[in-house]
Amino acid sequence: HDVPVVRRSSQLSFSILAILDAEPSNAQRILLERAVGFLLATAEAKPPPGPPTVGEAVLKDEGAVLRAQVHALNILRHIFLDTALAKEVAAFLPSAMLCALRGFG
């Protein structure tokens, strides 16, 4: 199937957002912090924070890097637009803005 990458990743972002929204809001949002950190690193094509994973080997392929970046940016877009997470994601806005600006360079 030759479906554009952006269309394929749209449902993925809703699935991840549902998981992040399910995290209790009265406790530290560990999943949200780790997910946004990983997605920002992926969007910038950097190794994700934390210990190395199997996914890093896949990111050696340039096509895989571009697909991963598209998916990461699409998921981040949905996370930042979610009103239920607005207060929690505000802390990530500076990093997200830098990521977006670096994407033009």
Image: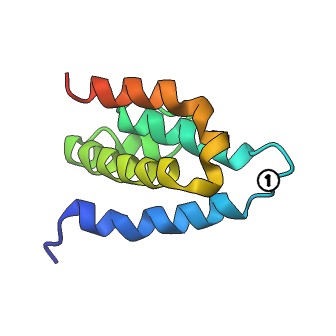
Q: Secondary structure at mark 1?
A: loop
Q: Which percent across, then down, holds residue 28?
A: 81, 42
Quadrant of the drawing holding the C terminus:
top left
Q: Does residue 19 sit above or below 78 in this rendering?
A: below
In the displayed structure, 35 sits above or below 100; it is below
Q: Quadrant of residue 96?
A: top left
Question: Along the horizontal axis of the image, is 53 left or right of 2?
Answer: right
Q: Position of residue 82 (x, y in %)?
A: 54, 56
Horizontally, residue 101 falls left or right of residue 3, namely: right
Indicate the colouring scheme.
rainbow
Q: Nearer the viewer, residue 44 or 84?
A: 84
**Amino acid type indicated by mark 1:** Ser
Question: What residue is at 30 percent from the left and 38 percent from the top?
Answer: 60
Report x, y in % for residue 7. Answer: 26, 67
Q: Quadrant of residue 5?
A: bottom left
53 or 97: nearer the viewer: 97
- Which residue shows up at 34% across the image and 63% down it? 9
How packed mark 1 is, by other alpha carbons closer than 10 Å (few <14, some 14-19, many 20 or more), is: few
Outermost residue toward the right in this view: 26
Q: From what the image shows, is residue 2 above or below residue 61?
A: below
Spot the residue most to the bottom: 1
Give the camera-side residue of 2 and 12.
Answer: 12
Q: Position of residue 104 (x, y in %)?
A: 20, 27
Q: Nearer the viewer, residue 47 or 82?
A: 82
Give the residue at mark 1. 25
Residue 49 visible, this orientation: no
